Amino acid sequence: MSKNLTPVTPRGAPLVRGNKSHKNTYAPRKKSFWKRLMNQKALLLMSLPFVIWLIVFRYIPVLGWIMAFQDYKPQNGFLGNEWVGLKHFRDLFNEPIFYRALENTIGMGLLGLVFGTISAILFALMLNEMRFIRFKKITQTISYLPHFVSWVIVANIVTTMLSLEGPINDLLTSLGIFDGPLNFMAQPNLFWGIVTSAEVWKSTGWNAIIYFAAMAGIDPQLYEAAKVDGASRVRQMWHITLPSIRAVIIVLLILSIGNLINIGFEKQMLLGNNIVTDKAIVIDLYALNYGIGMFRYSFGTAIGIFKSVVSVILILIANGFAKRIGEGRVF
């Protein structure tokens, strides 16, 4: 064989040895930003309605925040009102009922976060362990349905179930737990639990979708190896399934913590009454009754800004904690 033969790569290109120059080496040119944008125009067109919705209903309304620093009156427009600085924020923090609303909001938010997350993970684990595919799909479909039921209907169902002549009272009375029917809806100490139970029932199936999708991506060989080692189904879930979706759990927890005080007011307004008002008032309901309901638009805007600032702070704290312990994070 000749000694002057040049070794080649499988594609026939000569190998470069030593410190020889790479000036003649072909390097593919990077596409410009606009060219890459045009290559994805179909996806961009599909996302355009959402982008428009986001701008119109999320970013443009932020301009209305200036009302919180004015004595706003609709007839004067946005810029024709007297500027009052932080007056409405001082009024907000001097209102005793605001702190009661904040306590109720955080309390019900934490209960919903804890029990909602646990129930969604447990339900996803149950679906993941089902081996009969048709039954699994039927169960999934049924579990999603409550998410699409309005809170008006859910509140009517809960009120009927817990009424003096409802099935819950009949069952507890027949078992001898109660001597007579109990008016659950008139018990302030039970209100948080009633709201949380209704919310968990309504959202568990829907919230389990992401967890179940994450479980579907786990390598089946991990389970096969665990079976060979004699691991039971419970130990497989504890040592394989849950650690594999830990990053997803952390990210969803961070986002949920950011929404801790954004629990809405529909549940509390529909399930509440004059007897449980002290336990039912939340920040959103407070803003509705004492802001918009009394035509105090600037005061209601100040409440909205407070909620937004607290939500951002909670997300930053939760994300920083996740970053510190080396787990999944949002950014």
Image (cartoon, helix red, strand yellow):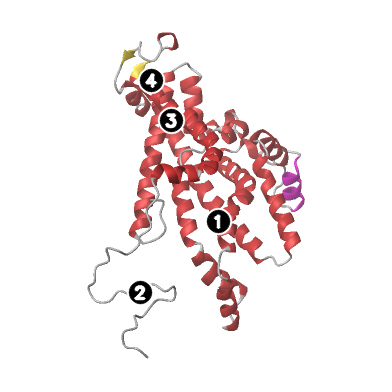
Callout 2 crowding tier (Cα within 10 Å): few <14, some 14–19, many ≥20: few
The residue that label 4 is drawn on is 67
Q: Secondary structure at mark 1?
A: helix
**Residue type marked 1:** Ile
**Residue type marked 2:** Pro
Q: Which residue is at the front of the view, 249 or 153?
A: 249
Q: Position of residue 82 (x, y in %)?
A: 32, 12
Q: In terms of sequence position, does the residue under pointer 4 or pointer 2 come before the other?
A: 2
- Does residue 97 appear anywhere in the picture? no
Q: In terms of sequence position, does the residue under pointer 1 or pointer 2 come before the other?
A: 2
**Residue type marked 4:** Met
Q: Secondary structure at mark 3?
A: helix
Callout 3 crowding tier (Cα within 10 Å): few <14, some 14–19, many ≥20: few
**Dot in front, 2 or 3:** 2
**Dot in front, 4 or 1:** 4
Q: Which residues are magenta?
A: 166-175
